Image: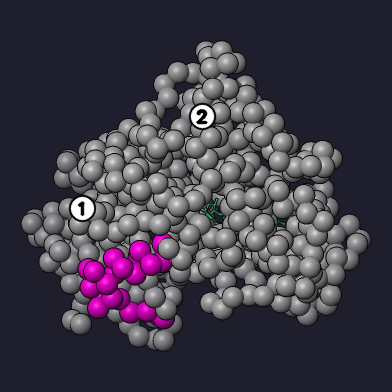
């Protein structure tokens, strides 16, 4: 490896892997670092029982190589975590990516040397890596959120976090298990652990909207059809979709342009049933006013309440599991396999920790409202310090000694979700200010990396050594993000999109909700105009 890399990449998940390949192909000297023992990013760590992706495999996959698209055959309609890991490993081998990655190595700090225009990355082993550019492919859902419960250290039972699951199978048989958290991870874990444990106690703070995933073996004919038309599928995913995927009931679906409030109840019902029949995230492809108008949104709330009620035998319990008081889709929709049915079992009970939050842990279990729930094991499915956590947990220091923690003290700020003012030559994939939570992250990562690659080529061509987002451009983009989110119902829910799930985190729209078309229009216009909004210097 040379003394100074052209590009250091932090993270070897989907984004980092494609960045290695793309930039290597462009002739750059690239090396990546990952704290994990192998490729996979967040999928490497999230080995919890039931882990499965909720965008169809045929779409949640790399698009940059037709050879890869054609050669790989998916087994499941939605890949399990293990199948995804097989795929990621296969891609890494095929493209010989591992020779450009150092595993088991966490980057603990990154300091910009202003005189030399170089990043110095220090690893947890004390090694220092120097690079002209640095790409943070650290993932938007990678830094676990681990609430500090009083007395947790006294608890004598086993503890697990969904995002740091052990490699070996955990055996819950015969055990009294508690689970805290009913987001996408928790609702996947619950039905599986319920089958194994002696008793499962679910500590629920906010009920979620969950819809059936309807997973199963992939339909070979459908997969063949998509493969035969991949260029058009990928084009539509990028240009004419809600979230970077278009498959609904085995057909590429159009965006809905009619309004909910201008449709008849019968038309609405037909659309909602169609999306529900597909399962998974299809419900997002829906009337646009569901995202902006509470009255419209309520019609979908009512529909989903009805569907949830149908799945739970005890009507009193069903009422406790119904999400209320915030718009549907304003928190990430969850996709389940037998989640609500798990509550029909005798060995599953629900404890509401909204009205009475968890008081403390004891040696034997968890105390809520003065009642001690005795447990042998507790699972924390408490999510992530999303979008910012992976970066703000690293010591990153930019121009004038400013730290990223200082720069983001009042909330994350970026330009186009790609760069941060005063942190030159550092790019982010799927960062705050990008459309990432609402857009298929594999495709977004590919496109952002292409933007970065083009930017580096421009820098080389013109002899520039430093690129930094201007303060004005950053302020403009933060305002664009704020205006976009404020035009929607998203701020009405306490979600990780808004930074509301981590105690003490600034509540701010963390992503760009202005639509993928507007996002790329802004990115491409900046590039076309000689990287307008960025200071370039020699
Ligand atoms: P999450 O959606 O943030 O859910 C965390 C859960 O923990 C919530 O129920 C939350 O309650 C609860 N919680 C947090 N702190 C708590 C506390 N102090 N006391 C009680 N409850 C507490 O996290 P996640 O389930 O890991 O999912 C995060 C995201 O990862 C998803 O939205 C999705 O984008 C992605 N994901 C996707 C898949 C998939 O593709 N199938 C699977 C897993 C994850 P509140 O709601 O009240 O905050």
Residue at the spot of label 2: 274
Residue at 23% x, 43% y: name it: 228
**Residue 365 x %, y %:** 82, 71
Say above or below: 56 vs 423: above
Residue at the spot of label 1: 66
Name the residue furthest right: 370
Say above or below: 296 vs 317: above
* Horizontal arrangement in the rendering, residue 519 relative to residue 303 (left or right): left
Q: Give the camera-side residue of 91 and 131.
A: 91
Residue at 35% x, 64% y: name it: 87
Residue at 60% x, 56% y: name it: 188
Distance between the Cα atoms at labels 2 and 1?
A: 31 Å
**Residue 91 x %, y %:** 29, 65
Which image quarter is the C terminus in?
bottom left
Mark 2 or mark 1, earlier in chain = 1
Mark 2 surroundings: few (<14), some (14-19) or many (≥20) residues within 10 A: some
Colour convention = one colour
Name the residue furthest front: 221
Which image quarter is the N terminus in?
bottom left
Say above or below: 38 vs 20: below
**Residue 67 x %, y %:** 20, 57
Secondary structure under tag 2 reads helix
* Horizontal arrangement in the rendering, residue 407 relative to residue 214 (left or right): left
Q: Is residue 463 visible?
A: yes
Secondary structure under tag 1 reads helix
In the rendered structure, which segment of residues is drawn in magenta?
84-108
Say which quarter of the image contains residue 466: bottom left
Q: Give the camera-side residue of 179 and 93.
A: 93
């Amino acid at each position: 490896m040379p003394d100074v890399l052209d590009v250091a990449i932090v993270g070897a998940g989907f984004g980092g892997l494609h960045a290695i390949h793309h930039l290597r192909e462009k002739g750059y000297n690239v090396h990546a670092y990952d704290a994990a023992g192998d490729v996979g990013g967040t999928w490497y760590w999230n080995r919890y029982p039931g882990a499965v992706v909720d965008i169809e495999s045929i779409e949640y996959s790399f698009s940059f190589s037709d050879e890869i698209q054609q050669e790989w055959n998916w087994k499941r309609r939605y890949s399990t975590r293990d199948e995804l890991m097989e795929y990621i490993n296969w891609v890494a081998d095929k493209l010989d990516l591992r020779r450009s990655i150092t595993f088991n190595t966490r980057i603990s700090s990154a300091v910009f040397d202003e005189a030399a225009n170089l990043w110095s990355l220090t690893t947890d082993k004390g090694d220092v890596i120097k690079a002209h550019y640095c790409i943070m492919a650290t993932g938007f859902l990678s830094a676990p959120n681990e609430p500090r419960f009083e007395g947790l250290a006294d608890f004598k039972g086993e503890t697990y976090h969904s995002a740091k699951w052990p490699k070996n199978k955990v055996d819950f048989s015969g055990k009294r298990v508690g689970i805290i958290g009913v987001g996408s991870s928790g609702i996947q874990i619950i039905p599986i652990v319920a089958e194994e444990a002696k008793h499962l106690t679910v500590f629920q703070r906010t009920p979620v909207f969950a819809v059936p995933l309807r997973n199963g073996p992939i339909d070979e004919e459908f997969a063949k059809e998509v493969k035969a038309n991949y260029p058009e599928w990928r084009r539509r995913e990028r240009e004419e979709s809600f979230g970077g995927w278009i498959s609904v009931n085995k057909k590429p679906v159009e965006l809905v342009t009619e309004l909910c409030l201008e449709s008849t109840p019968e038309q609405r019902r037909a659309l909602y049933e169609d999306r529900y029949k597909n399962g998974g995230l299809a419900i997002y492809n829906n009337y646009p006013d569901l995202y902006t108008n509470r009255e419209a949104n309520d019609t979908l709330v009512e529909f989903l309440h009805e569907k949830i009620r149908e799945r739970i035998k005890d009507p009193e319990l069903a009422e406790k599991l119904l999400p209320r008081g915030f718009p549907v889709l304003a928190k990430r929709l969850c996709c389940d396999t037998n989640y609500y049915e798990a509550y029909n079992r005798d060995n599953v009970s629900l404890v509401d920790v909204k009205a009475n939050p968890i008081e403390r842990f004891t040696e034997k279990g968890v105390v809520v409202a003065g009642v001690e729930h005795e447990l042998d094991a507790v699972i924390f499915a408490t999510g992530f310090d999303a979008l910012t956590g992976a970066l703000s947990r690293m010591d990153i220091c930019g121009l004038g000694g400013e730290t990223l923690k200082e720069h983001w003290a009042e909330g994350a700020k970026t330009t186009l979700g790609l760069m941060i003012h005063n942190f030159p030559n550092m790019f982010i994939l799927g960062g705050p200010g990008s459309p990432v939570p609402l857009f298929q992250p594999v495709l977004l990562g590919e496109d952002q990396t292409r933007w970065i690659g083009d930017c580096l080529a421009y820098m080389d061509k013109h002899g520039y050594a430093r690129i930094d987002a201007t303060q004005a451009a950053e302020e403009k983009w933060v305002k664009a993000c704020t205006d976009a989110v404020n035009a929607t119902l998203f701020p009405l829910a306490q979600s990780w999109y808004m930074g509301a799930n981590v105690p003490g985190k600034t509540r701010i729209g963390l992503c760009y909700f202005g639509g993928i078309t507007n996002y790329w229009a802004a990115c491409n216009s900046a590039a076309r105009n000689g990287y307008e909004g960025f200071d370039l210097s020699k």
